[in-house]
Image: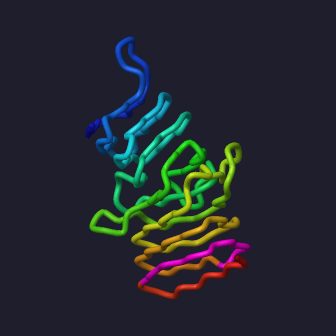
Amino acid sequence: FSLFSSTSMAVGYLPWLFGVATNNQDVMLTTKTNQTLSVTNPINAGTGGVNLQADNLALSTTVTGGSNTGISTFTPGRAITVGSSTCAASPCLSLVNLYNVVAPTIGIGNSGVNAAGDISVAGITSGTSLPTDFNPVTTRVGLLSGGSVTQTGAITMQDVGVVAGSSVHLTGANAVNNLAGTSAGNFAFTSNA
């Protein structure tokens, strides 16, 4: 199931449709430059994957991807802030309430042809109420940037993957068991796990 909108899009409620559900098929929802994707009713791909591509994202309810979920900007070079509604660089895709994403793996950003800009991590923690919280089902997070990847808050996650077109500076109070990463510049990482 794939849907593209040149304006803002809401996964909402219609009398005959409640959210988006597939029979274990992938779901891809995309909005154009500077538009917002609002998830106000559930997305459930079963064992399929979910890809959300938007410059602004509001997660108010669950997004279930059996294998993985990808969240990226529509506009190449746009910055991403994870765990805070305040952008480290503006404009940005601000990602909070990621505890609503029920998937073992979450990929944030894109390092390919239409790469995301810098990624700033305000925090990656486990729980179901804080802006920095990820769902306990999630054990692997990928941070994919055409720019740099930095942090202002702790990362607590079993597996973290990082790809950066510039440098990586993740030297906070992290608790990460497994790290995989590459960068075109310096790569600094600290973990107390």
Classify residue 91 as left or right of residue 152: left
**Quadrant occupied by the N terminus:** top left
Residue that sits furthest to the bottom in the current view: 186
Classify residue 94 as left or right of residue 28: right
Say which residue appears at 39% left-offset and 41% top-offset: 46
Q: Position of residue 148 (x, y in %)?
A: 49, 74
- State the extent of the magenta-drawn residues as a range: 171-183
Residue 22's image quarter?
A: top left
Say which residue appears at 62% left-offset and 65% top-offset: 157
Q: Please tell me whether residue 188 is drawn above or below residue 130 in the rendered image.
A: below
Colour mode of the rendering = rainbow
Q: Position of residue 141 (x, y in %)?
A: 51, 63
Say which residue appears at 48% left-offset and 28% top-offset: 41
Classify residue 135 as left or right of residue 79: right
Q: Nearer the viewer, residue 171 or 50?
A: 50
Q: Find out whether residue 90 is within the magenta segment.
A: no
Q: Nearer the viewer, residue 58 or 134?
A: 134
Residue 13's image quarter?
A: top left
Counting the numbered discs, the total is 0
Q: Please tell me whether residue 19 is drawn above or below residue 139 in the rendered image.
A: above
Q: Position of residue 131 (x, y in %)?
A: 66, 48
> Which secondary structure class fits the magenta region best?
strand
Say which residue appears at 37% left-offset and 46% top-offset: 47
Q: Nearer the viewer, residue 178 or 78?
A: 178
Q: Nearer the viewer, residue 43 or 172?
A: 43
| Residue 74 shows in the view | yes
| Residue 70 shows in the view | no
Q: Please tell me whether residue 14 is drawn above or below residue 24 in the rendered image.
A: above
